[in-house]
């Protein structure tokens, strides 16, 4: 049984505090997904906000065919994709010195070597490796939420990981201009 | 070295330890002899390790608050039709009972010549009562509340599952002000919106009154 099922049913009936509880459960993973896909703290927060509003509005139509978390990941991937399409420039430098130490931590992570290597990957590879290796989704879940066959998911993970390792093993200057 | 290189899916399955024992043995045998495939495996493992060592990141607190506070109103598309649906629910058993009575009376007049009306009249009345008795508790309570309303005493709207704070929050979401007193929830004004707001709640020990 989906561990979110009861809260989802209540949120579907319009109970906002049930939805807030669901947000509390999933926000960290949604934000990590968006941040690793977009490479920017602010853009990621915008995408998560957008995704949560979309999820709230679409919730009455959620039938529970997929796990709720899978459904949320799908909405977040779409919101991140839309945010990326709207962004005209490559990831900008984040505003310096956020007040909250957790934001400072996120900023350090997103300006690090791993993120620069991730930014250089094809978006479909980046989404696949973040979902599989960072969030621990199964091949089947990723196939479902990205709407491609499992074989394609595996191939994207293979290529994403391989390219990432190559970039991490070589000087990163060449990736900086490549969003 | 084995003749054929494993494909990328086999190499990924090897790294993820998803291969059956004999297939794994074949891949290992190949990797021992093939530097290119061994290098592919090394890259797969290095990429995986870098990703898995990366931490989860926290959504900035103020963004979460903004999101929750700014959730748009989500209107129940069926809401305008609820009174109609309720009316149908109420009317259906009554209509069914009336039809039953009609058939019964018709049959009685056709078969018995209508000489025994007084003896027959008990059965249809019971049928109506029984059909009415099968309707939901909300109506029963509504029917039972009007004398109390006349006296100005608090009127029990529904008994639901708590906790009370959650019910207060739920009512306030619907724009209904509510307070908790002596283990019950009290609301001022009209019972109908309160009943509608609590329609989805299961029954329980927490009494909700209107006064």
Image (cartoon, rainbow, N blue to C red):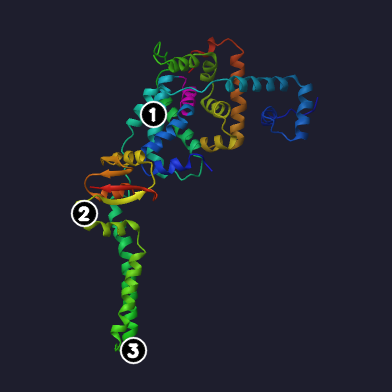
The answer to whether A133 appears left or right of B185 in the picture is: right
Q: Secondary structure at mark 1?
A: helix
Q: Label 2, label 1: how many angstroms apart (C-alpha)?
A: 46 Å
Do the residues at pointers 3 and 1 share their chain?
A: no
**Label 1, on which residue?**
A49
Do the residues at pointers 3 and 2 share their chain?
A: yes
Q: Label 3, label 1: how many angstroms apart (C-alpha)?
A: 75 Å
Task: Specify the subunit that label 2 lies on.
Answer: B
Bin the neighbour count of mark 3 within 10 Å (Cα to Cα): few under 14, some 14-19, many 20 and up. few
Task: Specify the subunit that label 3 lies on.
Answer: B
Q: Residue furthest front?
A: B182
**Label 3, on which residue?**
B112
Viewer-closest of B99 and B23: B99
Quadrant housing the N terminus of chain A: top right
**Label 2, on which residue?**
B149
Residue A58, image quadrant: top left
């Amino acid at each position: 049984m989906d561990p979110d099922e009861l809260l989802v049913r209540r949120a579907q009936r319009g109970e906002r505090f049930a939805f807030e509880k669901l947000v509390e459960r999933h926000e960290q993973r949604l934000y990590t997904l968006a941040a690793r896909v977009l490479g920017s703290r602010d853009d990621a927060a915008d995408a998560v906000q957008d995704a949560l509003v979309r999820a709230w509005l679409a919730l009455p139509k959620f039938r529970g065919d997929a796990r709720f978390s899978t459904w949320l990941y799908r909405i977040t991937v779409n919101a991140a994709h839309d945010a990326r399409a709207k962004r005209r420039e490559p990831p900008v430098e984040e505003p310096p010195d956020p007040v909250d130490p957790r934001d400072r931590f996120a900023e350090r992570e997103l300006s690090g070597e791993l993120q620069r290597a991730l930014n250089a990957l094809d978006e479909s590879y980046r989404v696949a490796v973040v979902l599989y290796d960072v969030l621990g989704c199964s091949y089947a879940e990723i196939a479902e939420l990205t709407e491609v066959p499992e074989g394609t998911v595996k191939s994207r993970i293979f290529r994403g990981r391989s390219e990432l390792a190559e970039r991490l093993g070589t000087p990163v200057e060449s990736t900086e201009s490549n969003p | 070295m084995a003749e054929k290189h494993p494909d990328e899916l086999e190499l990924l399955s090897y790294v993820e330890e998803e291969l059956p024992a004999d297939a794994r043995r074949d891949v290992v045998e190949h990797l021992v002899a093939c530097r290119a495939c061994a290098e592919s495996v090394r890259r797969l493992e290095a990429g995986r390790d870098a990703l898995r060592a990366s931490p989860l990141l926290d959504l900035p607190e103020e963004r979460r608050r903004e999101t929750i506070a700014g959730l748009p109103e989500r209107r129940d598309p069926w809401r305008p039709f609820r009174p109609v649906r309720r009316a149908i629910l109420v009317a259906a058993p009554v209509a069914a009972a009336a039809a039953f009575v009609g058939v019964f009376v018709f049959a009685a007049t056709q078969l018995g010549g209508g000489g025994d009306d007084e003896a027959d009249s008990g059965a249809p009345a019971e049928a109506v009562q029984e059909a009415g008795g099968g309707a939901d508790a909300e109506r029963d309570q509504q029917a039972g509340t009007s004398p109390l309303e006349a006296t100005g005493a608090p009127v029990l709207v529904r008994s639901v599952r708590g906790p009370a704070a959650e019910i207060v929050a739920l009512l306030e979401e619907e724009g209904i002000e509510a307070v908790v007193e002596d283990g019950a929830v009290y609301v001022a004004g009209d019972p109908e919106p309160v009943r509608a707001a609590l329609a989805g709640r299961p029954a329980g020990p927490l009494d909700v009154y209107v006064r």
